[in-house]
Amino acid sequence: MIGLSTSAFYERATRQIGGLRSQAEKLQQQIGSGERLAKSSDDPVAAARMRMLERGERLAQIDQRNSGRAQTDLKIADQALGSIADVVIRAKELAMQAANQTISPEQRSAIGGELAGLRQSLLSIANGRNAAGHALFGGQATGAAYTYDETSATYVGTDGADLIGLGDGQSVDPAVTGPEVFAFEVDGTTTDIFAVLGNLASALQSGGDSSAAASAALAGLDAGLDKVTTAQTVVGGRLSWIEIMDQRREANGELVADEKAAVGGANLAATMTRLQEVMTVLEASQASFVRLSGLSLFGMMR
């Protein structure tokens, strides 16, 4: 009888002390990690919510990478558009000089040569590349946006680029196409800046009626500059939209972080207090076990 009672005593004491040690270890782990949930069974409802929040965070990270990629490409396009505007403005200055009937044939020829060089510069910019190495103004094209010779340029890109998702069902076009930048209408006729510059350069270098050609080209250059300015506005608007979505994502991220802390985070003050309580009980239980086990052994010896 004494043996059975002593065995039961030891078993109960071992379970009690083991349970207290397990609680203490769990509380210490929570304090060290700052997390309340070590496994789903600790709180199934909270664990399910935490998984949803973590999935949202992973999706937000994808959206952030997409945002960065779109922003980079649009900034490259914006810089290119600024260079295009500078070229067209310089071409307008030269066309106004060429329209002056008092300049010499040599001066007209020199202006024509510079205009031909400006046309080539625009073609080089038009066939620039984005961050991925694709045609900057070619839509989805991976090669050049334009093929050209000394008299003409042909757009060989696509109608547009793939939209890039920014999250919350929102997306952005990361580029503008060649026709959106370089093509326009003058007196109801569709043309492009390459044709305007090429025709003017040829007229000035050939010695024909360059004054009339220069005056006619100014209307095309004005229309071309308006088109470039419009493209700059479009790109600027898209960059602003990306910034708004980034700010919204950042704000949502802060809310998610707060909710994760509330749902799965450990309340350090309360946890430390609870740990102290458990450690006090554990120490008392161990001391009691030592005393009671000594009495049990003494009883058995008697």
Image: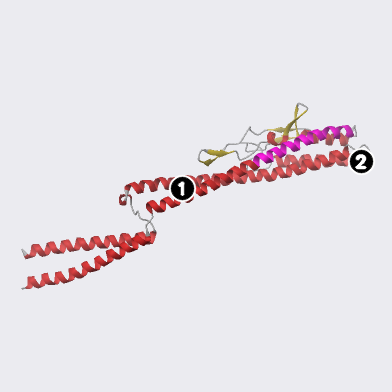
Query: In the drawing, what numbered circle is on residue 251?
Result: none
Q: Is residue 218 visible?
A: yes
Residue in the picture at 23% in, 62% down: 18
Separation of residues labelled 2 and 1 (CA atoms): 67 Å
Name the residue tied to disc 2: 106
The image position of residue 103, as x and y in percent, is 93, 40
Task: Point out the stretch of residues depicted in magenta.
Answer: 210-235
Pointer 1: what residue?
57
| Membership of 225 in magenta stretch | yes
Horizontal and vertical percent for residue 15? 20, 60
Q: Which amino acid does the dot numbered 2 rest on? A: Glu
Name the spot of residue 6 as percent of width and height, x first. 11, 65
Circle 1 SS class: helix
* Residue at point 37%, 58% (across, down): 267
Residue farthest along the top direction in this orientation: 188
- The residue at the point 87 percent across, 42 percent down is 110
